[in-house]
Image: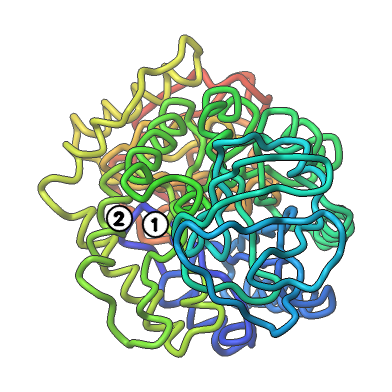
Amino acid sequence: MIRNRRAKIVATLGPASNNPTTLQRLFLSGADVFRLNFSHGEHETHAQTHTMVRDLEKILGRNSCILMDVQGPKLRLGTFKNKKVSLTKNQPFTLYLANRDGDEVGATLPHPEIFKAVEPGQRLLLDDGKVRLRIKKVSEEKIETVVEAGSSLSDRKGVNVPDAVLGLSALTEKDRRDLKFGLALGVEWVALSFVQKPEDVIEARKIIGDQALICIKMEKPSAIEHLDELVTLADGMMVARGDLGVELPPEKVPAAQQAIIAACRRAGKPVIVATQMLESMITSPVPTRAEASDVANAVYEGADAVMLSAESAAGDYPIEAVSVMNKIITETENSEFYSEKTAEFAGKALATGSDAISAAAATVSEALGTRLIACHTRSGRTALRASRERPNGHILVITPEKAVARRYQLAWGLHCVCTHGVADMPSFVKRVGQIARLEGYVQQGETFVVTAGVPFGQVGTTNTLRLTEATG
């Protein structure tokens, strides 16, 4: 079951896919990471899905990676007297803090944080941007606006505030309950929604600790402004183009995507591109040509993973969506333009032994045309440095830590195997040769590159590179 491509596929699980048979078919079709979306579903359902993924891990003998996605604050209007109202351009529309029946004149906005943060001249976007309001006047009790675009509104539509930073934690009480539950299950990654500033990540880290890695969902303009700080604090990032595409003008989203990917590439941290990648496959067995190009461009830019949302969670063709995405990635990586394109987004190696060894391993592998780099790691950091270099061959990660083997299935090019009983360099070289042949990466006698640390097995000591042959 060796993958013939290096970029990974994240498949969201839901009603269309959270059964053992479909789950196994998703993996065999190419899914590498499974996402549990805590915006939907009960804890009991997520626990059952988690168990199914772990059972599949045992059946297939492959480490599974699970990402839980917490909902974050959801800002919504109140209800309307007649369920729905019509709007016209330039009409006044008032948002009230106090509860009232909505009508053509105005509606309830039960979020005092918005009233404290916004100013005249700023925008409010309703119903995923379908309605745009321009703020004229703000008081403690109401926000007076004028309709700039949009023709109707109905009950409980979402509200986006792109021009202000709200005094809200990225974690609601629901999120805290979900986090406690998900961390107890043993998820590998937490996708953190509604991040506006570095303090939001620091707050989440205090709760999560080292129980899981944090993937920041980049979906707010204010987060883009803090990109460098957030990359430092994160373990990975997601280009969450849903809300990002609402709060930013559409023409700015591609540049924001490239900036986020490039920042993660420089830092050597995994980055996922998400939302609407194969949207039409929710109801169609084939994607549009534009969607195929969208997936390919994310791969060219050097994304570690691309993600399916409703396509695999609730669509009519979840297996087909994963299979098509797998084919697009494979074809893209085999393109004559791939190495040149991904090199454009590469950063310089840091002045550390691990970075220097990883960069040298990629250079040696390319010069000799070897198909494999194998690295030993306890923390996973060496594996990420190897992934950051985007070598031409595959990367086999050998670790004694089960959590590490699971977590870094998300990163570009990494195939992680958990194994014990490797106490020194000779035993590691022998063991990795056996695994590499068993996994189908090399044949008997074939040369490949090995990196490790001496003293062997200590965290942060990667200092050795050698060529070896697959034997044993």
Q: Amino acid at mark 1?
A: Arg
Q: Nearer the viewer, residue 180 or 245?
A: 245
Element at badge 1?
helix
In the displayed structure image, the side of residue 126 where residue 444 appears, left or right:
left
Query: Which residue carries the number 2 mark?
Result: 443
Q: Say if residue 45 shows up in the picture.
A: yes
Query: Which residue carries the number 1 mark?
Result: 437
Q: Amino acid at mark 2?
A: Gln
Q: Quadrant of the N terminus?
A: bottom left
Element at badge 2?
loop
Q: Position of residue 89 (x, y in %)?
A: 45, 61
Residue shown at the point (64%, 19%) measured from the top left: 455
Q: Nearer the viewer, residue 52 or 234?
A: 234
Residue positioned most to the left: 336
Q: Position of residue 184 (x, y in %)?
A: 87, 58
Give neighbour class at mark 2: few <14, some 14-19, many 20+ (Cα, 10 Å): some
Give neighbour class at mark 1: few <14, some 14-19, many 20+ (Cα, 10 Å): some
In the displayed structure image, the side of residue 368 where residue 278 appears, left or right:
right
Indicate the colouring scheme. rainbow
Q: Position of residue 33 (x, y in %)?
A: 55, 62
Q: Nearer the viewer, residue 443 or 202?
A: 202
Residue positioned most to the top: 351
